[in-house]
Structure formats: C-alpha cells, structure tokens
Image (cartoon, coloured by chain):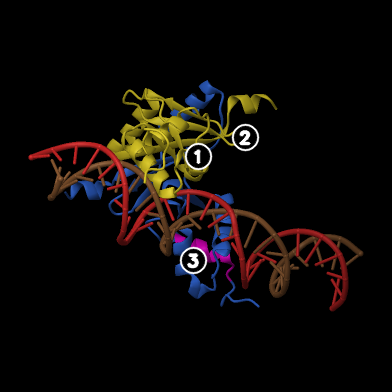
Chain colours: A blue, B yellow, C brown, D red
DNA sequence: GAATAAATGTTATAACATAACATAATTAGC
DNA sequence: GCTAATTATGTTATGTTATAACATTTATTC
C-alpha cells in the first residue's frame, strides 16, 4: 500500500523540504518533520539522502552529521563550508585558490583525491559582530 | 576500587595506545582494545579523548568518527588529512598556502574560524600505484 | 584529618546509521 | 496487455557512536 498522499517520491519529498533550510538537517530531524508526508522509517530518509548525494544535489556536513542542499555553482571548485556554532547557519563557498592549494598538495603526495571534506567551525559574521 | 593495574591514568593509557597506530581508531575500538587495561566503559574512553583533544595531542577525524595522534609540528598551519579509503591510512599534512587560502576566505567573509576540518578522502600513493 | 576539587566508575539512554528481507510499483521486452 | 526484471518502498531489528546523570574514589589544600 502506498502511504504518501501525492505523486512525489521520497527523494523529491526530502529534497523539497531540505531546499528551503538555511541550516542543515540531520536524518532524524528530516524523519521527524516528514512523518506527515508518509516517511516513517530512518531507512527511507537515508535512502533518499544517498540518492541526492549521488546526484550531487546535496552535501553531507560531516562534523554535524547533517545534510544541506548544494549551491550548484561549483564550477570545478571544491566546496568549503563555514559553520557557525552560535546560530547554526552553514554557508557554502567556492574558492579557486583553495582548490588549487589542495590540488598541489595531492599532486605532491601522489594522493588520488575523491571527496574533499572542508569545513570550518567558528562564528559567522553576524554572530561575531553583534557582541 | 581502582581497577587499572599500574599507575597510568586513563588519558595516558589511551594516548600511549593511540600513539603507535598508523590508522585512526574509533572510541569503541579503543574501548575493546583497552579492556585489559581496566577501561571498560565508553564514558572513560570519551573522557580521555576529550582531554587529549583539549591538550592538542590528538585529532578527531570527522569523516571516520575516529581519533589519531597529532604530528605536533603544526607551526601555525592548519592540519589537513589524506584518508585512504583502500588501506585506511591517514596522513597529516601542513601546508602554508592552503592555510593562507582559508585565512583569506574567512577574512573576506568575516567569519571567525575556530576549528578547521580538512579531510580528503581518496586513494593513497601506495594504493593507487599498485593497480 | 576534614573540606574541597578532580578523576573515575556505573548504569542507562540518546543519537546516528545500516542490515535483512518482504512487498509494491514501474519498465522493458514480447 | 502480459510477464519478467528492475527499481522503489515498507518493515523490523539491530549495529554503531556519543552523552547524561549520578555515585564513589582519589588527590589536593588548608
């Protein structure tokens, strides 16, 4: 029996919900928030997230165990995330010189990069200027 | 009642064990391996890891949920880790130009960095040259 | 040696993630 | 359109990572 009320599949439901969020959400936050859409098991959430990740539509924020939509303007650059530990906002940045630095490093060491994880924990401009 | 057999405290026990490892260990791997030293609860392991982290003696590898001793030659540079998904080895690197790139980015965005998490998943030189 | 602080022990549980297998929906070929 | 194969989904259970809450012990200070 199909439990969802409309013709969106789980992957689309998760993506649409995540799309509007400033801060990333954990899988269990998604599960909780999307109960009303017929998503009732962790497995369902994780399967959707896996597909979105493969499609390059979302990123996993490793240091938060949370998920965020991709800005989709990578243009060959590696994404780096600024994570505000005060307000929880996460912003994605693309930076050519950073990307070059990492490429140089891996070239020098002979490492074959696959998935760079670049996250900076700290305080965003709004939070550190309001002190 | 004191259960450990010698005069090392838990923090030292964990550090000494971690020190010799090429690959990082998870908290539960440490727990399992250090049962014989009287460490029998997750809490004990996490408390030791927290102290070592504060002391700057270890790093947490976020994308592996695992822990590794610090090379202790940072010299103001931010550590970046190359993580081999084939053999599990993790190597720590210090790179001035990478550090500069990140500083420039945070200066531009007004972000106050606290803890940079820089990890590259991929294939180490040994694993990618043996193909 | 009593009072305080720091470290450790113990039990329970929260939070994050996947395994294993059953069923349903979609599609591809005939 | 029917059947087979594939893909998606549902369901239950469990594995893995991390912390809370509180008791006890050890070390330190006066």
Instruction: Please name which of the two marks, 1 or 2, marks the residue nearer to the observer.
Output: 1
Image position of B9 with respect to C29: above or below:
above
The answer for how far apart the CA atoms under marks 3 and 1 are is 40 Å
Cα separation, mark 1 vs mark 2, equals: 30 Å
Q: Residue at x 51, y 61 (%)?
A: A15
Q: Position of residue A52 (x, y in %)?
A: 55, 55
> For mark 2, does the 10 Å Cα neighbourhood hold few (<14), some (14 to 19), or many (20 or more) residues?
few
Give, as a single range, the part of the protein colored magenta. Answer: A8-18
Tell me the crowding category of disc 3: few under 14, some 14 to 19, or many 20 or more residues within 10 angstroms, Cα based.
many
Q: Position of residue A62 (x, y in %)?
A: 45, 47
* Prevailing secondary structure of the magenta residues: helix
Image quadrant of residue B100? top left
Query: Residue B123's mark?
Result: none
Query: Does residue A12 belong to the magenta stretch?
Result: yes
Report if the CB atoms under discs 3 and 2 are less than 8 Å apart: no
Local secondary structure at mark 2: loop
- Secondary element at tag 1: helix
Same subunit, tags 3 and 2 = no
Name the residue tied to disc 2: B86
Residue A21's x, y, as percent?
40, 60
Q: Please name whichever residue, A37 or A19, is drawn nearer the observer in this view of the structure.
A: A37
Q: Are marks 3 and 1 on the same chain?
A: no
| Mark sitting on residue A31 | 3
> Which residue in the protein does label 1 denote?
B36
Out of B81 and D6, give the one closest to the viewer.
B81
Nearest the eye: A20 or A131: A131
């Amino acid at each position: 029996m199909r439990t969802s009320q409309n013709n969106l599949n789980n992957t689309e439901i998760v993506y649409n919900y995540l799309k509007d969020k400033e801060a990333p959400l954990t899988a269990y936050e998604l599960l909780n928030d999307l109960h009303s859409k017929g998503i009732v098991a962790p497995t369902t959430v994780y399967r959707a997230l896996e597909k979105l990740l493969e499609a390059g539509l979302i990123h996993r924020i490793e240091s938060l165990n949370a998920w965020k939509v991709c800005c989709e303007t990578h243009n060959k650059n590696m994404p780096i995330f600024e994570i505000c530990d005060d307000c929880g906002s996460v912003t994605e940045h693309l930076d050519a010189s950073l990307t070059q630095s990492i490429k140089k490093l891996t070239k020098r060491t002979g490492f074959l990069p696959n998935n760079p994880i670049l996250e900076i924990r700290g305080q965003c401009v709004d939070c550190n200027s309001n002190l």
